[in-house]
Image (cartoon, rainbow, N blue to C red):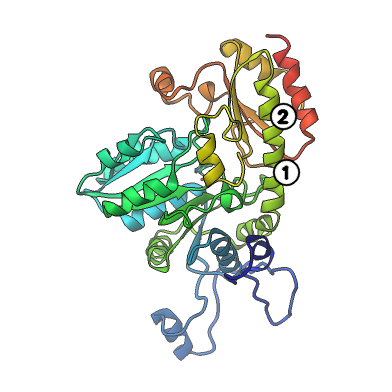
Amino acid sequence: MQRFDQDTLAVRAGTERSQFNEHSEAIFLTSSFVFESAAQAAARFSGEEEGNVYSRFTNPTVTAMQQRLAAMEGGEACIATASGMSAILATVMALMNAGEHMVASRGLFGATQQLFGNLLPRFGITADFVPASDLAAYDAAIRPETRIIFVETPSNPLTELVDIKSLAEIAHQRGVKLVVDNCFCTPALQRPLDLGADLVVHSATKYLDGQGRVVAGAVVGSEGDIDEVFKFLRTAGPSLSPFNAWVVLKGLETLRIRMDAQCAAAAELAAWLEGHERVARVFYPGLESHPQHRLAQRQQRSGGAIVSFEVAGEREQAWQVVDHCRLLSITANLGDTRTTITHPASTTHHRIGPEARKEAGIGDGLLRVAVGLESIEDVKEDLARGLALI
Ligand SMILES: *Cc1c(COP(=O)(O)O)cnc(C)c1O
């Protein structure tokens, strides 16, 4: 289905009808599949004959989701996983061995940071963390045993961008693979594989489902790389359930229109915050004041749906804004139809400690809003209430 536009692929790719000719995709809630004969069972197990065997390996509903997301990301293949974290773990396990090394951008999602910084070193896989936008720092950190560069762009919560195209060139010159966590932008805004990245990982929990219903993940890339990820997944087990795959499959159909609406609202909110006298600074790639605004215009379809801002004050003033919200959900989750607000210094970035927070530029007055689908006027009014008290 490669010749179609992404909007068409989002509603059509991966659709395979059963004998009943259903229009919407069926959910195959089955753990295993039966064979016509002993000979067919043997052929399926040996791989001589294609087909489903057991849902830890493959399942038709999961396959449909994988085909759709692969088409939307412009990748050859996709493998779905039980969560975003298992997508990241499976990617590392597929591409790396004990004694090998990776370079990662600073300011990664908290659990990714824990995985790379604390858990994987126990198994002989180590990581160096470099400032997200500093291309020379990635190059300098590459060693003979480096296998991958892993980045998130834009970063959370300060929306720092990684120049994917330039970093892919550096990675390939050094014989290293570039993995991009495309959770914040999704293929609706940014297609890392088109820019030269080797693999894309997703937390489908966020915008791909987009309605806060399931935990899910995915990896997209070349047939060869995805086959390695599949081998790990099939054996280690964090496969996606057919039901959750179906929820994501339907979520993908509305991804673009949701993202367009949420990004437009976020841009409006960012501009309003920038003009607010109780707001010291706004972090949003769609604003001209963003230091990488030009890169954002080149690399992303829009500024995204996440806006961070510093209130004129410290933790007390920031908490005041949070506590006067009546509409916004106080939660660290994002990528939902409902707007969420969080105070990173005391939630998502609490564990890294005050020194690391200072170094990362995450102040006590910082708030992060992940804009949903409510009227942006109502969202502004909700934030204005607390801001007026500062
Ligand atoms: C949420 C998130 C993850 C982890 O995904 P889960 O589905 O929660 O396991 C990874 N990366 C980013 C950028 C995220 O926001």
Image position, residue 106 (x, y; %): 40, 34
277 lies above or below 55: above
Residue 279 quadrant:
top right
Report whether the residue tagged 1 is closer than 8 Å to ligand 1: no
Left or right: 55 as drawn, with respect to 19: left
Report whether the residue tagged 2 is closer than 8 Å to ligand 1: no
Residue at 45 percent across and 90 percent down: it is 39
Residue at 48 percent across and 22 percent down: it is 362
344 lies above or below 189: above
Image quarter where the N terminus lies is bottom right
Task: Pick whichever, 26 or 272, lies toward us.
Answer: 272
Image quarter where the C terminus lies is top right
Image position, residue 135 (x, y; %): 35, 39
Task: Pick whichever, 205 or 239, lies toward us.
Answer: 205
314 lies above or below 141: above
Task: Pick whichever, 86 or 101, lies toward us.
Answer: 101
Q: Residues within 10 Å of mark 1 (few under 14, many from 20)?
A: some
Q: State the count of labels.
A: 2
Q: Which mark is residue 328?
A: 2
Q: Amino acid at mark 1?
A: Ala
Helix, strand or loop at label 2? It is loop
Image position, residue 69 (x, y; %): 57, 60
Q: Which residue is mark 1?
A: 261
Q: Amino acid at mark 2?
A: Leu
Left or right: 25 as drawn, with respect to 289: right
Mark 1 and 2 residues: CB-CB less than 8 Å, in contact?
no
Residue at 51 percent across and 79 percent down: it is 51
Residue 271 showing in the rendered view: yes
Q: Residue furthest left?
A: 144
Of circles 1 and 2, the one toward us is: 1
* Chain-order first, disc 1 or disc 2: 1
Helix, strand or loop at label 1? It is helix
